[in-house]
Image: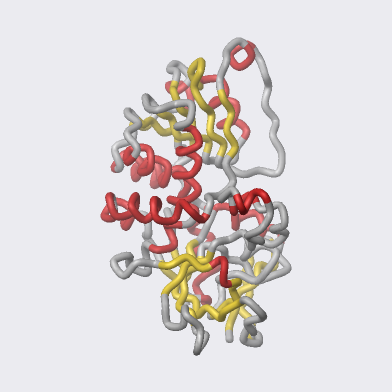
Amino acid sequence: MKAASFTGDGRIAVHNVAMPQAGPGEVLLRVRACALCGSDLRPLKRGWACTPGHEILGVVDQPGHAWHGRRALVYIPVFCGHCPECEAGLTQLCRNATDLIGWQRDGGYAEAVAVPEQCLLPVPDDIPDDLAPLLLDTIGTAAHGVRLARRVVQGGEALVLGAGPIGLGAILVLRGMGFAPVCVVEPGAYRADFAQSLGATLLTPQEAATRRYALVIEASGKDPARQLGLEVVAPMGAMLQLGEADAWAVTEHKPIRRKDFFIIRSFYFPIADHDANIALLRCDMAAYARLVDARAGLDGLETLFGEFARGERLKPLFVP
């Protein structure tokens, strides 16, 4: 079969490789689609040891298995199911999960991938292939973070910093969960225009700095956004950190130090959230469908990643 590899400096090579073999407790999944993600951009720049791609939809190809012929999404953490976190339903926090699919083991920028059975998520018939991968990071990660924030902030004005796939997903989740108004800071024209089309109010960083927000979602992974978010979150409000970076550099000065507020870091979603995430998608399916704005096979994947990295695409798909 064919599979992609990140060779560094934004380059992608396509190789002929052996078809993966499903080991004990695994199934073979024929990839239907794998969504591009902003977290892919760091390994794309550095090079990566395994086949990347972690927002995977496929069809199980395992004759005799109960899942054979069914569409499934791939839950990224290879969780154990028996540690205290897993038993509490916090599968995303499994203390024994050393591997993430698409990170430490081969992922979905390929024609097929071997997947542990416990990482299969069913896809209802009414969810089309193009939209199913959104149930993972775009909806799943954003929605779990907002659910955590609702433990301390029930509603009110929200600010989203960064309108990439997670930020745009957060805007849709916020409007689905009753937060209003929703404001956004996004320097890229294409993504900023799209955020406004979803009903968000576009602000410059300077304009955002004049207001206070019950909930701030940092979805850019950039230090200036973190700094701004910590400064403008309202007293007793919540700052939700979704963006990823290797290190933080934030100055704690008076606007941060002289107030009580909550900082929430959310990594991924528990597997038990899947049905609730499907419900969010169903309630606003036409809006979510607009996020999927490009598709490419293996030969066009490098070009598609270049457009995505420049902010010219929202949530494109690799489709074998």
Q: How many labels does the image show?
A: 0
Q: In this view, does 205 lie above or below 192?
A: above
Query: Colour scheme used in the picture?
Result: secondary structure
The percent position of residue 38, horizontal first and vertical second, equals 55, 52
The percent position of residue 124, horizontal first and vertical second, equals 34, 67
Q: Is residue 28 left or right of residue 283?
A: right
Q: Quadrant of the N terminus?
A: bottom right
Q: Which quadrant of the figure has residue 258?
A: top right
Q: Which residue is drawn at 46% across and 28% down?
A: 215
Nearest the viewer among 284 and 185 is 284
Q: Which residue is drawn at 52% across and 76% down?
A: 298
Q: Is residue 56 above or below residue 64?
A: above
Q: In this view, does 320 lie above or below 47?
A: below
Q: Can residue 168 be seen in this view?
A: yes
Q: Which residue is drawn at 51% across and 62% down?
A: 55
The percent position of residue 249, horizontal first and vertical second, equals 70, 30
Q: Is residue 139 above or below residue 293?
A: above
